[in-house]
Amino acid sequence: MKIARVRVTHIDMSFWGDFAARQDELPLVTLMAVHPQYRHPLSSWFPSDAMCVVEIQTDDGLVGTGWCEDYARATSVIIENHLTRLLVGADPLERSRLWDQLFRSTMPYGRKGAALYAVSAIDIALWDLAGKHFSQPVFELLGGRARDPVPVYASHLHFTNEDEFVAEATEYVRRGFKAMKMRFLHGPADGLPGMRRNVELVKMLRAAVGDDIDIMADAYMGWDLEYALRMCRALAPFDMKWVEEPLLPDQLKEYAILRSESPVPIAAGEHETTRYGFAQIIEAGALDIIQFDIGRVGGFSEARNVCALAQTAGLPVYTHAYGLPTLHLATADTAVSMVEYFPVPVWDDIEEAPHFDGAAIPEGGQTSVTDAPGLGATLSLDGFTPLV
């Protein structure tokens, strides 16, 4: 069996579904908040949301499908203009060899970012294809069911006003979520009043959901070390499960200081890639919780390596983002403790729908994947024109 064709399709829709459109007009602190003209809305600086879908077809007609984010069409171009020629004619079941070739060949311009998005999408497609070839779901190829169902946490919570904020939080409790994550509104540019407001919102959330629900909050790289230290000390009374991405990803020295002095666990990793990047994080003692994204880290092949590193270091993994690849990994790998999910808030009139790849809406704060071969994805490309 050989790869006969690689088809790449750019899709001008969000990898995150309705969440991305809703979040654009909601207040939150980000790494660009230091520049007043890009404080709000998110779309004033964030690249247009888009996806790259990769279909790998063999000479006997099997097709494996993978996908990732495709900001500025960068991922699609890398696959179309470079990586496709490394794939055609290769044995698709030799996933380890292909991963290494893809990673090494992109080294002059890669290592992280869009090049690793491209490698991730291809790797996901190869695992999907292998599952179809062996008539097995991907989680079986990864070692079988280690857990079923998979616990998920609600990760939409934004402050709009007090009534909606409390209503959204209490609705997640009613739906059976055991954990939920909010977004911080303020960073260093907002001074002490902003810091106090951040604390007030966490206090409000804890009061709304009670003591038996885990609460987390995301700063999306919008703080500096001094601010993060002061915030985490102020948040100590509220028994938070973690504060997420308070600093820029490469500030490992600062992360290590924060982790050593913060009374609240520190989580990050969605913007890091490969075992090499996470080995540096772990060696620096920079994080309490690992949060890679399977569509960025290097696909299934590299996610397994990062999970092994995290387990060896005694660090839990709470994966970034939802979708069938993530759920197959979490089903098979005991390192993954919980998966992120973006529900529609109770104050919105949009009907919650299955994820774009067919992943089910969680029930009771948990979900399962089927025994369908491969990923079991139902992704439709109708109306979109392939690039190759």
Image (cartoon, rainbow, N blue to C red):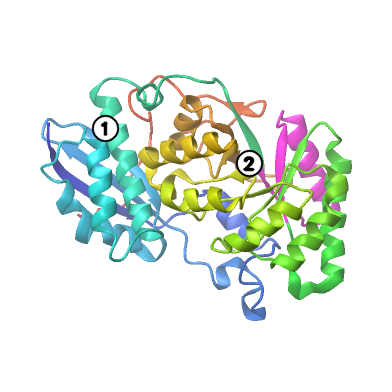
In the rendering, at what x and y percent does residue 21 appear? 57, 57
Q: Are marks 1 and 2 in contact (CB under 8 Å)?
A: no
Question: Vertical placement of 315 versus 282: above or below?
Answer: above
Amino acid residing under circle 2 = Pro
Residue 295, disc: none
- In this figure, which residue is indicated by the disc labeled 1? 129
- In this figure, which residue is indicated by the disc labeled 2? 343
Quadrant including the C terminus = bottom left
- Observer-nearest of 79 and 55: 79
Picture residue at 54% right of the left edge, 20% below the top: 148
The residue carrying pointer 1 sits among few (fewer than 14), some (14 to 19) or many (20 or more) residues within 10 Å by Cα, namely many
Q: Which residues are magenta?
A: 155-183
Picture residue at 10% right of the left edge, 35% below the top: 59
In the rendering, at what x and y percent does residue 291 appear? 56, 45
Q: In the structure shown, which secondary structural element does the residue marked by tag 2 occupy? A: loop
**How many angstroms separate mark 1 from mark 2 (CA)?**
30 Å
The residue carrying pointer 2 sits among few (fewer than 14), some (14 to 19) or many (20 or more) residues within 10 Å by Cα, namely some
- Observer-nearest of 60 and 306: 306
In the rendering, at what x and y percent does residue 210 appear? 86, 36
Question: Vertical placement of 36 versus 245: above or below?
Answer: below
Quadrant including the N terminus = top left
Question: Does the magenta-highlighted stretch encompass residue 357?
Answer: no
Picture residue at 82% right of the left edge, 31% below the top: 212
Amino acid residing under circle 1 = Leu
Res 172 quadrant in image? top right
